[in-house]
Each structure stands twice: as C-alpha cells, then as structure tokens.
Amino acid sequence: MDPLVDRLDRIRGTVAPRNHNARTIAALTSNPGCGRRGLMDAAGVNKGAVAGQLGFPAGFGQSRFAIARGNAFEAQVKADGAAELLQLLRERLGLAIPEVAYDDLSNVGGNASREVRYARTKALLARAASDRDDAGTLFDHPMLRLEIAGYYAYLEPDLIAFRAGGKFHVVEIKSFAVIDGQADPGKTAAAATQSAVYVMAMRELLAELGHPPESVSHDVVLVCPENFANRPTATLVDVRKQLTVLRRQLSRLTRLESILDALPAGLTFDLAYDGDQQATRPADELRKAVSTIDARYSPDCLGTCEMAFFCRDESAGSTSALGRSVRDDLGGVESIGTVLGLARGTLTPGAGQEEIAGLLRFAHKLRTECLDGIG
C-alpha cells in the first residue's frame, strides 16, 4: 500500500472514505491555506459527522429533494443510450456523426473500485484519442484522477462526449433551470468551476498518453432544464478562466506530507461507532484531535465547509473571523484585542507592528471625530 494512503487511512479511522469530487476540490482551492480541510478531505473524513459530534452541525448542503431531482433529471437525459443528450450535442457542436457508441464506466465487469474504473477509462480514452477520425462514443461516469497536494483524488464527471473536431468535451448535467435563456449566476459559476476540475483531470490523463492539452476542449457542455419544464437544453461554457485560477490555487496547497509530519503519532478522527452506528467518541477528545491541525477560517467557509461553525467558534476573538481581506489588511495582527489596543494607544506596538499601529491610531482618531460631529 502507498505509505501516504496508509497514513491517511489511519487518520480517518475505521469507516469507509468519502470520495473527493469537483465540488470539494473547488471549495478547497478557494481557501488553499487551510491545512485542516486539506487533510480531512484527503483522508476522506466525513466532516459533517465530525462537526456534529463536536456540537457544531453543518448548516448547509443539498436537500434530499434536490438530490433526487438532480438524479431524476440526469437519468432522463441519459435514457435510451443518451438519445436526448445526443440530439443536443448534435445541435450545439454541429456533429455529423449519425450514430455513436455508449460506454457505461460506473463499473467494470461488476467491479466498481476506483482504481479498476480509472484503468478502464484510461484505456478507452487512449484508444479514442488515437483514432484518426472523430471517435463516436459517449463515456458515461468515467473515473478520472487529479493530484491534490501530493496525493491522487479520484473524480467522476457526469459524462465525457465523443470527440468532435479532434477535441473531447466534458458534459456536466445540472438540475437548476435556465429560464428565458438565463440561469442563476452563482450556480452557473459553481458549475463552471467544478467542470474546470474535470477538464484539468482529463487533460492530465491524456498528457500521460502523449496528447496535447488542447485534446480536451475548454468549452464545457452544461445541460440544464429549460424554463419550467424538464426539457433539457445545452449551453457551451468557456472555463479557461477557471482553469487558470485552479492551477494557481492547487500549486499553493500545503503538501500533505508536511502536514502529517507535524502531527502527533496516533492522531485520528475516528468517531468510534457502536453496533447501532452511533458515534461514541468523546467530544472533548475529538476537539483536541481536530484542533491539532491549523485551520484558516474566514466567513466564506460558512457556505462551503461542514467544519465552518466549529472553526468560527474556535477563531472567536481573532482577526481571521472578520474575513481574509480584513486579516490581510491588518498586517498579520491576529488578535482583535491587540488591534483595538493598538488603535486606542493602550498597547505598545511590537516589532514590525509600528506601521499598522500608526494606521490604526489614525483610523480610530478619524472615527472618534466623525462620531463627535454627529453628536
């Protein structure tokens, strides 16, 4: 076994790992300095269960109704060998291919392991990429992988379309509606970022096979319901900007080996489930284990990480709780109490704090004068 994978398994404990996906990678790269999230995601830890055992249950996530709606829409689009999707692709990509093959890669001969599915995906895509003509095959739920901070995360896009014009296209199926040609900007941006993760992983796979990055199109096919019906519509989304950001943020992630080497031996997030699948790990003991790993909390985390409420409580009184921009503007002063003391002149600036202390005193003076003027 890979020594790194073995160490991550011990960190997670006795439960099965939760797979990384494009959504978790996109969230991780939005806060690349958080070693806590990086390690917990890499180890496949159920962050929601850990947060609940600590007394800070996650306050976000998809409802079961939204998940069921999304699954139903995906099944509709892929029904009958993805006939409905194929028609959309013909219209959107200008395809001349009359018939296509359909490969379901959700398992290989009944084997659903990530490694086996990745090997099969790689073999089929290698054959398709080497075909002189555009290969007419739809690859359903292929298994890709992407290196994240020194280990491989396995990823499963909805579908990879056959080559058109010498390029593969990633297809992302979402259940949010496009109404009168417009979709929710936030949901569209999130879908574009997640799709960029798949494009990057696909390009890395083909690069190993000797094919250029351009073999995978930067135009992702986003399929959504149109208006208030379930009739699907397809849109091309250019993810070049998202690819650039992802590449930069991934390069900034702390290597997992560095995080693991700094941890005490025997550290684990195991919740010690009993026979009734109830967690029995004492909350105080779990809190001590979680707090061993440095976090980088900001208010943005509340919408992207199950551990956010715990980390917010942990960071109470620190400038990080005010947001990244405020923390960065304060020049590394970590305590709100220290900031107030420097602003009021009741604390003597330490080494390297002279400039920020002067700015804080000026801001405090200006605020006082404004308030006096109002009074």
Image (cartoon, rainbow, N blue to C red):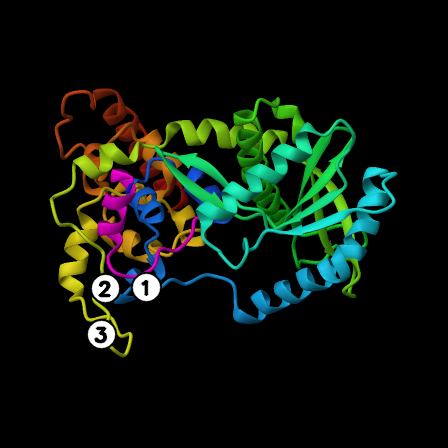
Give the residue type at disc 1: Ala
The front one of 87 and 324 is: 87
**Residue that appears at 20% across and 66% down:** 272
Give the residue type at disc 2: Leu
Relative to 166, is 250 on the left or the right? left
Q: Quadrant of residue 336?
A: top left
The front one of 297 and 172 is: 172
Q: Secondary structure at mark 2?
A: loop
The front one of 248 and 214 is: 214
Q: CA distance from mark 2 to mark 1?
A: 8 Å
Asked whether residue 4 is drawn in magenta, I would say: yes
Q: CA distance from mark 1 to mark 3?
A: 14 Å
Reading the image, the residue beneath label 2 is 271
**Residue that appears at 18% across and 65% down:** 283
Reading the image, the residue beneath label 3 is 274
Q: Are marks 2 and 1 in contact (CB under 8 Å)?
A: yes
Res. 190 in view: yes
**Structural crowding at the residue carrying mark 1, measured as other residues with C-alpha within 10 Å and reported as few (<14), some (14–19) or many (≥20):** some
Point out the tag, 1 or 3, that comes first from the N-terminus.
1
Relative to 204, is 138 on the left or the right? right
Q: Position of residue 23 (x, y in %)?
A: 50, 48
Q: Secondary structure at mark 3?
A: loop
Q: Quadrant of residue 97?
A: top right
**Which quarter of the image is occupied by the N terminus?**
top left
